[in-house]
Amino acid sequence: MYFRHFEHAAPSPAAATELTRRQFLKVTGVAGTGLTLGLLVPGVAAAAGGGAPIGSFAMPFVHIAPDNTVTVICKHLEAGQGVWTGLPAIVAEELDAAWSQMRVVNAPAQVPQYGNLAMGGQIQLTGGSTAVANSWQQLREAGATARAMLVRAAAKTWKVPANDITVSEGVVSHGKRTATFGQLAHAAAQQPVPAQVQLKDPANFRIIGNDKLPRLDSRAKSTGKQQFGIDVRLPGMMTAVVMRPPRFGGKVTSFDASKAKAVAGVVDVVQIPRGVAVVGRDMWSAKQGREALQVTWDESGAEKRGTDALMKEYRAMGAGKEAVTVTKSGDADAALAQAGKRVEGEFEFPYLAHAPMEPLTAVCRLSPDACEVWAGSQFQTVDQANIAAAVGLKPAQVSINTLAAGGTFGRRATPDSDYLSEVASIAKATGGKYPVRLIWTREDDVTGGRYRPMNYHRVAAALGKDGKVAWRQRIVGQSIVGGTAFAAMMIKDGVDPTAVGGSAAEQYDLTDVHVSWTEAKVGVPVLWWRSVENTHMAYSKEVIIDELAQAAGQDPVAFRLALLQKHPRHVGALKLVAEKAGWDKPFAGGAGRGRGVAVHESFGTVVAQVAEVTVTGDKITVDRVVCAVDCGVAVTPDVIRAQMQSAIGYGLSAALMGKITLTDGHVDQTNFHQYQVLRMPDMPRLIEVHIVPSANAPSGVGEPGLPPIAPAVANAVRAATGVRLRTLPFDLAAARRA
Amino acid sequence: MSVKLTVNGVTSDLEVDPAMPLLWVIRDHLLLTGTKFGCGMALCGACTVHIDGVATRSCVLPVSAAQGKQVTTIEGLATPAAKAVQSAWIALDVPQCGYCQSGQIMSASALLTGNPKPSDADIDGAMAGNICRCATYVRIRHAIHEAAAGLPAATMAHG
């Protein structure tokens, strides 16, 4: 997901205030039912679990209970990226809480209260590595507000000036008198909400930036206790699987359910807009039932091309004239014609499945006037609307219980809420007579589309005698947001930024540039995949820049630094990674050893990486990766390190083995034996992450660690072997022949 | 049809299809949800349980084949090796999304039970069947070594 493109959609302050007031009226209405008596604080959230206990202090993002626990209401999906630790850390810091008293629950689906401020505030969603960035000011204020009210409560109780009260590690003190947050919670809730609060001087941070702040979810996730969507069990719940068209764009003509219904445990077989659902008393019966189901498909509108044929078309389109301009300045053609050192390349990138470890799963309970869903929802506001449409209710009648997701990498953020629309449709088609759980099998997931788009790049770059670099690039690929509700908001002048952002024109000081895009119309559904367009844009950019350095006989780091004078944060990350990798010292290579570098900014964060590889025959082993990251203030450094490690592994998986191919419109891979992913022996033994010190507001870390790894490895392989890797995933034997 | 199954020391008589994979019996009938579904083909390791102490993929094993044996899930882990593994996992903040971690922990604790001081190559061999898409592998390796460091070298097999 991408957020820069949403900024113009931000509501006016007046509109926000109006919505807040209406929200307030709605919420105080809930309070009047007695669920949250004594909590007459504006904007009380009906948090997951049914609200705070009596005697609590409850604000939209912070609850303090009489038992002295502080619960942060998390508006973002925890899918591994660490928001259940990062967001509580921000609150705890300003609140001066003890880390051991911090808890976290997911927010209900509710805007604008829990809208993503990086996306205009009217949509609740997690994506674009925005969770910490858009929550930073909001949660600092929430923590400071709660602290101020606790202090006022103590001042009033003890009849002392508020200014003389101190707060530390969850204890409020005046002289020898002390009180816990829990003891003051009820009184604090009676205090007026301060209009303005003083935020801490960052010099006094003790939780933010704490190098080893334990994650709040490690225990549950190390004992099997963490609940995911697939673990939800409601009384009388049935389980469904869906038979979907064998080719994208196919439709049901007819089906024969007689054999499926004969399977023990199968209770219903119903048609839904996306296929035919088989409902059983457990997963095994539903799955057996689906195997017995016979469906006739109308494939007249289905995509029947294979990926070989598509790539052939892409190459032709890449050489053709038809394209929209992404960026143009100076005269790239003239500069390329005159320059001495010239490098060219055609790059090919495959479709990629996200393949999160928890396959898509959701539970739905439908009644005539309400629909309740449990899932690892990533797009709550969009999901509410799509679920409502599927069951014929209003979005406000749809409630979503957001649970931890077993990975997403973008897969759960679908503009049409595919799996959630399905589970809602099944509930509707079965008349709401039982709660229904939908499970996608791994085969459903791998063959189900929503892939990282296949892409073709054609790049020509040259170094002039004046040291200037000219750059011409054509990108051919599908639009991610085209045809979705996001198109109007995000596509400008015919360009989908999620297809072509992050080019060399944006990331280096170039004067003669022409970047253009030819949109391919293909019936394979595509989606944002961890770091989106940067997955391919960074690759061709960093490989070609590296080859230019080589052509110029210059050091790859020094060559980049000279082209980054207007990009000080790139310079900082690059210098730090070079220092930590010992770049200035001769590489202890030997036969088949090489090292390479790459740097890329995405989602406001700059990451530079040095990869060291050993090439044995045609096998590439990545031995060591050194990573430097500038993400502004490092809120939770250990989570940042974990995210860099994670993105490096996820990116290496794609670089070394990831690909989805189609033959005549049928996906060739079905499960992990064919859609290969990175395993323990393939992971670099050494990954060192260094954080660039920064006082800037924090930016995201879930995605930006990914883009540099594939080009850094490719550059290392070229250093070791002289072979240029132009096609992903890497096939060294094929590249040697090319 | 009735199946007699012992999971975490508790024996139950279950009216299920004997061909049903152990995974779905554990999850859908015994309601122990710590064991995860990931692939259904013994390719990812998310469903790993111990059968008589041996790490086994439950998603392809018919429940009938587990009759008369001791099945242990993440909820029933109690050996010193398993406790050391879980402590190391928490201390090093291994999990990210966490979905695969039950299976990782089942494989790691079985490894340490049979081989209390595994080498990196041993770890590669024992853990290659467990996929983590968050790629927590660096920390998993570290945590296994940490857990091993805290265990006596002579831990008995299946002890």
Image (cartoon, rainbow, N blue to C red):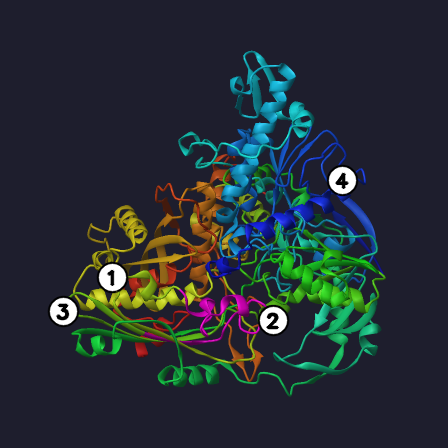
Callout 3 amino acid: Lys
For discs 1 and 2, the disc positioned in front in the rendered view: 2
- Labelled disc at residue A591: 1
As helix, strand or loop, the secondary structure at mark 4 comes to helix
Q: Position of residue A661 (x, y in %)?
A: 51, 76
For discs 3 and 4, the disc positioned in front in the rendered view: 4
For discs 4 and 1, the disc positioned in front in the rendered view: 4
Q: Chain of mark 4?
A: A
Magenta highlight on residue A198: no
Q: Are marks 1 and 3 on the same chain?
A: yes
Say which label, 1 or 3, has the lower sequence index: 3
Specify few, some or many for label 3: CA neighbours under 10 Å numbering under 14, 14-19, or 20 or more: few
As helix, strand or loop, the secondary structure at mark 3 comes to loop
Front-lying residue, A354 or A179: A179
As helix, strand or loop, the secondary structure at mark 2 comes to loop
Q: What residue occupies the far top of the structure in this picture?
A: A176
Magenta-highlighted residues: A473-501
Q: Position of residue A615 (x, y in %)?
A: 32, 63
Specify few, some or many for label 4: CA neighbours under 10 Å numbering under 14, 14-19, or 20 or more: many
